[in-house]
Amino acid sequence: MSYINGIGLISPQNTYENNEFLQNIMEQNADYLKCVEPVYKNFIDPILSRRMSRLIKMGITSAKICLADAGEIQPDAIITGTGLGSVEDTEKILGDITKEEKFLNPTPFIQSTYNTISSQIAIILKCHGYNSTYVHRSFSFESVLQDAIMQLEEGTADHILAGGIDEMTMNHLQITRRLGLWKTGPVSNLRLLEEPGPGALAGEGSAYFLVSGEPNENSYAQLIGVETIYKPSSREKLFLHVREFLESHQLNTGDIDLVLTGVNGDVNWDFLYQDFLSELFPGNAAAWYKHLCGEYHTASGFGLFTAANILKHQVYPEILALNTNSPKDFKYILLYNHFRNVNHSLILLRAIS
Amino acid sequence: MPCRIFITGSGIISGIGKNLYETLSSLMEGRSGIGRIRLLQTALRDEIPVSEVGFNHTELFELAGLSPQEGYSRNALFGIIAATEASRQAGIGSGDPIKTGLISATTVGGMDQCELYYNDFLTNDSRNVYIESYDCADSTEKIADHLGIRDYVTTISTACSSSANAILLGARMIQSGKLDRVLAGGCEALTKFHLNGFNALKILDKEPCKPFDEGRNGITLGEGAAYLVLESEESLKQTHNTVLAELVGWGNSCEAFHQTASSPDGVGAYLAMKKALEMSGLLPEAIDYINAHGTGTDNNDLSEGRAIEKLFGNHIPKISSTKPFTGHTTSAAGSTEAILSILCIQQQVIWPNLNFRVPIRDLHFSPVQKLLTHVPVHAVMSNSFGFGGNDTSLIFKKFTSSHSPSQPATS
Amino acid sequence: MEELINKLRKEVIEQLNLEDISADDVNPDSPLFGEGLGLDSIDALELIVLLEKNYGIKIEDPKDGKKIFYSIRTMAEYITEHQKK
């Protein structure tokens, strides 16, 4: 059994203080949704933080917020997922070496290694346990959760600090705009579906969760299962996989009170979500969250935060709803996300009775 | 009783050979892959020796069985070449019913092409395909697609212990029943990016590295890819593959000391090796050989040496680092050296620690200096310790069919 | 020498991102490493880059850094001596 016992989230919404769930929603009219950040000095010793890139400060701080939320539990393992790692440091080095290979600073190089976030959290917490980093696009955070669940099943850890983090920079956005991933100019996050168009609205965030083997009075939800599906050979195969996943947990599609999707406002890909919902969950409540955090490889961290809070507080903020279906109460939530029809993932949660 | 993990396929490309056969020949003949940089376009080419895979882009496509096309980094091609060799040996076929996953590891990803075209990314659309292939997942997905592996695909990056952690994860997924077969390993191509990065840390030797030598001066970087196929007992019953070795123990630990340095006593290394030994059920004296991480830095070799002395006490096995042969292949080091360790078991040899002359003053052992042949090698420990103190140790054992009467004995 | 020391104080603060410290806070004779500023081996490497980039002085062996970077004053003295060559 796995339980979400603590959350720390730095996101483009007011989330890092862990107070009222999704109140004071931020509208941003922007090229990409930027995080609302705490004063890092309040969380990290300035002597340590001076060397840290923004991504690492975000990661360490959200990890600390998570552990405080969990009641200051020392984790036995630290696992991080990131699709792109430290974009800022990588760009700095690339900028330097494409000019000339001289006077390269060592600090950005160290910070650019993907596992530096997990490592630096371990250094600060003095945690010698299992430490790993997953770097597979929109499977990164899901792979983390799968590993955490396995750790609990293996009995090798009681508490796992599990995170998903990605940052965006204007430079990176402009480069990746060439791939047609993003909107071509600033848009309002709250009007994404009203003004449909190609490309998603990019975002960023850092979400850490304490995944434990036992619930406590602070627990948010039970994490039942996580599934990653790579390049399903047909829509039918995908739908079959979803049904089988639910059946393996003694559930069918009718048992799901809410499907929380990774709809992101990109008309080129969102139709797959509509198709998914109409085929498998036509009568269920459906919601989305990427208008609040933007699209990034580990955005399902924001999704997990959302689902966990709905289950804990039994509230359903209107801003999330994709349709008008609304169950009396929330027992099961299924998160479904895909990246360009290649990386599909499912996260299944249950309320703690 | 957790299920046993059998190694039934291995594939490798590095500075000492484009496949397993060439790799074995180079090792037996004492031929190092370290030399002057020939292919990488870098201002450091006359300053720093490396172990380069001596094939250009076009030749790599040929080795991979692909027609030259845009969007393939050298890294991805290394991965495809090595993964295909391993996959063929184990008979992994597209569409066969055995639940098979791919766990690959890399840190530089597609940077070898990205750094060539970065200015284009900033100014025009001519190289967009390389923007897509820049990240760590790209090589993994290209390997998965090339081999038709779909059941589980992910990528790990923990610096120099990456591919050892990929193997470790593969074993765990098999034991948890999630998969029956895993292709696990890593790939890393040399780049200006990390060559300059390591140079900025001042840990590159200007001469070929000399691990465990008192006068050691740092790392010699290498490149390449290496993959193993791990099978469960259930899978083996169906494939009837020859078992190359058994993976009997693994351990991962985090030093939590410093971002780039190991603690003087090698606490993380000690914990990782101890975990692996405990899991294997073997006593320290049962380990015949340690393929050390042995990078040739002041810091690693001393702390790894101390950790080995603390764990093994009076039963220190034969030790060598094979990095003077292959260079330090960073994310591919764990799986590269796992294969070299398995070759020791298969061939009953122990690889020499080239370039060694004077033992480290503070240690009480010297590594193996000459190739040892016809020696009993039943159990080998392979160490990989990464930046950020991510330490992993794997133990491979000679396969005996005593517990599984239906299996063929090893060759 | 005093001019160089003042320049170095500012450069070191910038290179090592010591945001909360002003140049006046850095005593030219106090040890940079260990206590006080709490600098470590990576900072030593950053100072090597600073010396090369701003003063054209190359330090090949990072172990030499211990003596050279003992304090701002020893750095200034090393620069003065080696820039003449």
Image (cartoon, coloured by chain):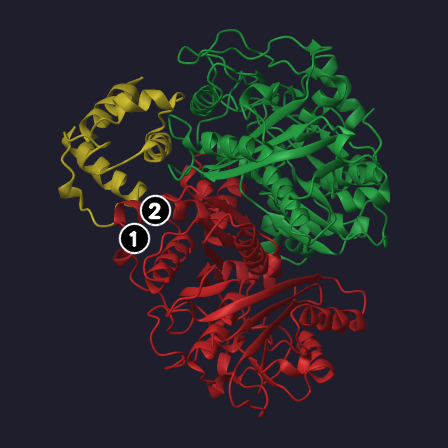
Chain colours: A red, B green, C yellow
Question: Looking at the image, can residue A194 be seen?
Answer: yes
Closest to the camera, between mark 2 and mark 1, is 2
The answer to whether mark 2 and mark 1 are in CB contact below 8 A is yes
Residue B52: image x %, image y %? Answer: 67, 27
Residue B83: image x %, image y %? Answer: 76, 40
Question: How many callouts does the rendering have?
Answer: 2
The Cα atoms of the two marked residues, 2 and 1, are separated by 9 Å
Disc 2, SS: helix
Residue tagged 1: A44
Residue B392: image x %, image y %? Answer: 54, 35
B105 sits left or right of B89 in the view? left
Q: Residue drawn at (63%, 76%), measured in percent from left and top? A: A266
**Image quadrant in which the C terminus of chain B is located:** top right
**Image quadrant in which the N terminus of chain B is located:** top right
Residue tagged 2: A124
Three-letter code for the amino acid on which mark 2 is drawn: Ile
Who is closer to the viewer here, A289 or A240? A240
| Vertical order, B355 against B36 (above or below) | above
Three-letter code for the amino acid on which mark 1 is drawn: Ile
Disc 1, SS: loop
| Vertical order, A332 against B199 (above or below) | below
B108 sits left or right of B30 in the view? left
Q: Residue drawn at (50%, 31%), measured in percent from left and top? A: B274
Chain letter of the residue beneath label 2 in the structure image:
A
Tell which circle, 2 or 1, labels the residue nearer the N-terminal end. Answer: 1
Question: Looking at the image, can residue A178 be seen?
Answer: no
